[in-house]
């Protein structure tokens, strides 16, 4: 089938590449010439495992095209995916200007029946706004309701996770399609069924529903996941106070199949492009509808505070004035396998350490450039603080002579480091671990002063040094 993808961000690029991979003829549009140039030169503007190789292969076989030509993009696809950004407005609601602009262009240039798919996460009711914008454009062109220019708007939210996006797309748990039940809506549904047929061969994974429920499903899924994380973070803070171990508690509750093991990891809070934005947008949608989502308001509050929970631990251990101290920071992206720094906890932790006078030497396997860029913006009002953070290209360089190691992202390469050399490199052997990567008892036996989230702080075994 001929498919157009509008927007080459995470969702658009992964969707386009994966749909081309299963045999469709894909045209990717972006208004950003720089991104299109990168893609046409064999690069990929984001870091996502497997994506660059996949796109290179697809380009070599002529199955995917990248362009800024709006008219050609509309004419190409019988299915038009809108996968543009929906950044939060100042009040937390999703800014739909790019979605509506894409819709206007479809109305302006469409030349036959089109299925218009909302792939971006958009508030309930957006499909109706898209429909109205397209209809207005068609009316302006004098086409009214002609069959030649009919269309239907479908909601098909995306559930992929950054860092595992290609895999998630190629092996979906479920595909959600929301369509109208009029003639055009049923035709659109048939086309979507054909589009995704390769994913449903052995097992029907598609859930069909009305458009509003599909739009809502995406928000409810992310809100539920964010709730689990904030819940566990709250439990971890209590575990700290009552001397329980959140890791043991996690296993204890996760073994109940009604709870399950996934998404129960306490840490320095959730970040990324989805959870913070979607929780806020849902709270906003509720208040616009005269309703308060009290649980989600608390989820957001807890997450906000959680981003500084490690700073509180550092203060308790080293005092409030951190001037003259240097911290090695491992992990900057909001989670492993991505260079995405959106809402990353590292931004808050680093800013807080700098504000208390500390120096920071930061390392991340892939997010250094992005981190340098966003921290320069975050700290533009405090240029002196900015001079106290440096970015280094190895874990060891970050450690050399630092007062403590702070871990903020659970990259695989941090999971079993050489603790003896960590001890030797640091001025004093102290680790503040925001991702609970190590065992407190084992750390104490190694003579490392180890602080984690919701886990006991075990006194250092003084015989460790003799053994080392
Ligand atoms: C999320 C959803 O998982 C995905 O379905 C949706 O399409 C987009 O939003 P993503 O933002 O890529 O995906 O990351 P995810 O792996 O879900 O992690 C989000 C944040 O939660 C990260 O900051 C992560 O560190 C944190 N997290 C996750 C925890 O703190 N604890 C956990 O147990 C799981």
Image (cartoon, rainbow, N blue to C red):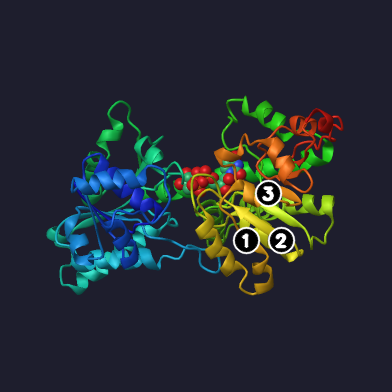
Q: Earlier in the sequence, mark 2 or mark 3?
A: 2
| Residue 267 horizontal/vertical position (percent) | 66, 44
For the residues labelled 1 and 3, the Cα–Cα distance comes to 12 Å
Residue at (68% x, 65% y) in the render? 388
Q: Quadrant of the C terminus?
A: top right
Element marked by disc 3 = helix
Write down the residue under mark 3. Answer: 399
Write down the residue under mark 1. Answer: 390
Residue at (62% x, 55% y) in the render? 362
In the image, residue 260 above or below residue 380: above
Q: Does residue 301 appear to the left or right of 102 in the view shown?
A: right
Asked if labels 2 and 1 touch by Cβ distance under 8 angstroms, the answer is yes
Q: Earlier in the sequence, mark 1 or mark 2?
A: 2
| Residue 449 horizontal/vertical position (percent) | 79, 40
Q: Earlier in the sequence, mark 1 or mark 3?
A: 1
Q: Quadrant of the N terminus?
A: top left
Element marked by disc 2 = strand
Write down the residue under mark 2. Answer: 359
For the residues labelled 2 and 3, the Cα–Cα distance comes to 12 Å
Q: CB at mark 3 closer than 8 A to ligand 1?
A: no
């Amino acid at each position: 089938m001929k498919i157009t993808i509008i927007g080459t961000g995470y969702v658009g690029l992964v969707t386009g590449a994966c749909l081309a991979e299963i045999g469709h003829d894909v045209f990717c549009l972006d208004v950003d010439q720089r991104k299109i140039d990168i893609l046409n030169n064999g690069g990929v503007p984001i870091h996502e495992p497997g994506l660059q190789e996949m796109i290179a292969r697809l380009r070599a076989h002529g199955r995917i095209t990248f362009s800024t030509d709006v008219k050609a993009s509309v004419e190409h696809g019988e299915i038009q995916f809108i996968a543009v950004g929906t950044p939060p407005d100042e009040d937390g609601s999703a800014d739909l200007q790019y979605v509506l602009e894409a819709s206007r262009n479809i109305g302006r240039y469409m030349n036959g029946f089109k299925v218009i798919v909302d792939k971006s996460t958009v508030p309930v009711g957006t499909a109706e706004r898209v429909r109205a914008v397209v209809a207005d454009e068609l009316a302006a062109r004098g086409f009214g309701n002609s069959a030649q220019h009919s269309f239907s708007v479908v909601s098909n939210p995306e559930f992929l996770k950054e860092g595992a996006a290609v895999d998630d797309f190629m092996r979906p748990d479920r595909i959600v399609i929301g369509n109208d039940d009029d003639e055009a809506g049923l035709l659109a549904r048939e086309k979507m069924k054909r589009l995704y047929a390769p994913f449903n061969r052995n097992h029907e994974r598609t859930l069909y529903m009305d458009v509003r429920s599909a739009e809502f499903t995406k928000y409810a899924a992310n809100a539920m996941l964010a709730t689990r994380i904030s819940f566990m973070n709250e439990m971890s803070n209590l575990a700290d106070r009552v001397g329980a171990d959140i890791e043991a508690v996690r296993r204890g509750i996760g073994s109940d199949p009604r709870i399950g093991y996934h998404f129960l990891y306490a840490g320095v809070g959730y970040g990324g492009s989805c959870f913070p934005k979607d929780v806020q947008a849902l709270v906003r949608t509720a208040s616009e509808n005269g309703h308060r989502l009290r649980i989600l308001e608390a989820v957001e509050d807890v997450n906000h505070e959680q981003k500084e929970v490690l700073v509180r631990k550092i203060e308790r251990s080293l005092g409030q004035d951190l001037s003259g101290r240097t911290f090695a920071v491992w992990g900057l992206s909001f989670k492993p396998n991505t260079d995405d720094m959106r809402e990353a906890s590292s931004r808050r932790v680093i800013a807080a350490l700098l504000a208390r006078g500390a120096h920071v030497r930061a390392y991340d396997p892939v997010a250094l450039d992005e981190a340098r860029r966003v921290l320069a913006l975050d700290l533009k009002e405090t240029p002196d603080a900015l001079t106290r953070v440096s970015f280094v290209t190895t874990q060891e360089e970050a450690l050399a002579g630092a007062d403590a190691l702070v871990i903020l992202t659970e990259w695989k390469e941090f999971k079993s480091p050489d603790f003896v050399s960590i001890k030797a490199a640091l001025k004093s052997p102290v680790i503040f671990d925001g991702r609970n990567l190590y065992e407190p008892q084992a750390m104490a036996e190694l003579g490392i002063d180890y602080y984690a989230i919701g886990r006991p702080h075990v006194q250092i075994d003084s015989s460790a040094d003799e053994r080392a």
